[in-house]
Image (tube, rainbow, N blue to C red):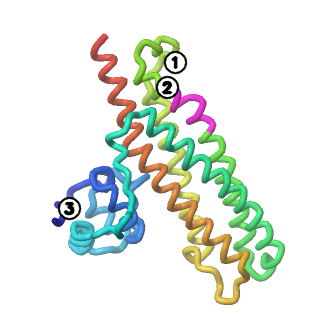
Amino acid sequence: MARKITSEMTVAHIATTHPELLPELERLGIDYCCGGGRPLGEAAAKAGLETETVARQLAEYQPPENTEAGDWTSRTMTELADNIEHTHHVFAREALDRLKTLTAKCVAAHGDDEPRLHELQHVLAVLTDDMHDHFVREERVVFPWIRRLERPTQIQGGPPWSIRRPIDCMIHDHDDVGEAFARVHELTDDLSAPEDACSTWRECYRLFGELEQDTHQHIHKENNILFPAGIEAERRRMAST
């Protein structure tokens, strides 16, 4: 049975209501994480696509058999925070470390012929510092705070301001990461290595793409599910006091 998808729906709503559509949104280049608040029509136009065609494709999309599309809206905030830490944070740290090695090899071997590799190395260094700092602030401040919101008796020891404050900082960081990946695409011809590129060069671009896709899912879980749930949990608690 076809899904009901309209151009007025936000991409975030589509992604959270129909998590099985994430691979198709990714394939179409529809931003469902940082730009998830946009209506589908606006997001499709930004991606250079015809809105009615995109809506029909999403409505009729059939995921491959045995595809697992987790409905994270039904999980507790603690379960979701744990999942983000143990999967996305772990993967990103490992991928960034591997990319540092790969880009260094590419610069050493091909930097004279392709000067953009030098800037790519710089973009990666900044992205790595920003993401590591972001993960630490989530793991030490934001996620523990959200977990305490599910255990109200432990809230008294928390900071005196609203959780919106650190969440706004995290969302701002997400926007910066999105801009960094956009610059990566500019420097790599949309992650397309030259025809005569060596295996290291090709692996470098492949891993950049894998990290970007995982980061999209990571940010989607936070911006569209976990952070709104944390804000709502705090609102309910304040209303009950």
Mark 2, Cα crowd under 10 Å, few <14 / some 14-19 / many 20+, is: many
The residue lying at 43 percent from left, 12 percent from top is 153
User: Relative to 1, does residue 12 appear above or below in the rendering?
Assistant: above
Q: Is residue 233 left or right of residue 214?
A: left
Per the model, the C-alpha gap separating discs 2 and 1 is: 9 Å
Residue 19: horizontal and vertical position, in percent? 34, 55
**Label at residue 240:** none
Which type of secondary structure does the marked residue at label 3 adopt? loop
Q: Earlier in the sequence, mark 2 or mark 1?
A: 2
Residue matched to label 3: 5
Mark 1, Cα crowd under 10 Å, few <14 / some 14-19 / many 20+, is: few
**Label at residue 145:** 2
User: Is 138 in the magenta?
Assistant: yes
Q: Is residue 49 left or right of residue 101?
A: left
Which type of secondary structure does the marked residue at label 1 adopt? loop
Q: Quadrant of the C terminus?
A: top left
Per the model, the C-alpha gap separating discs 3 and 1 is: 41 Å
Q: Which residues are magenta?
A: 136-144
Residue 203: horizontal and vertical position, in percent? 67, 73
User: Is 184 in the magenta?
Assistant: no
Q: How would you classify the magenta stretch by its main secondary structure? A: helix
Residue matched to label 1: 159
Residue 2 is drawn in which quadrant? bottom left
Q: Is residue 208 left or right of residue 32?
A: right
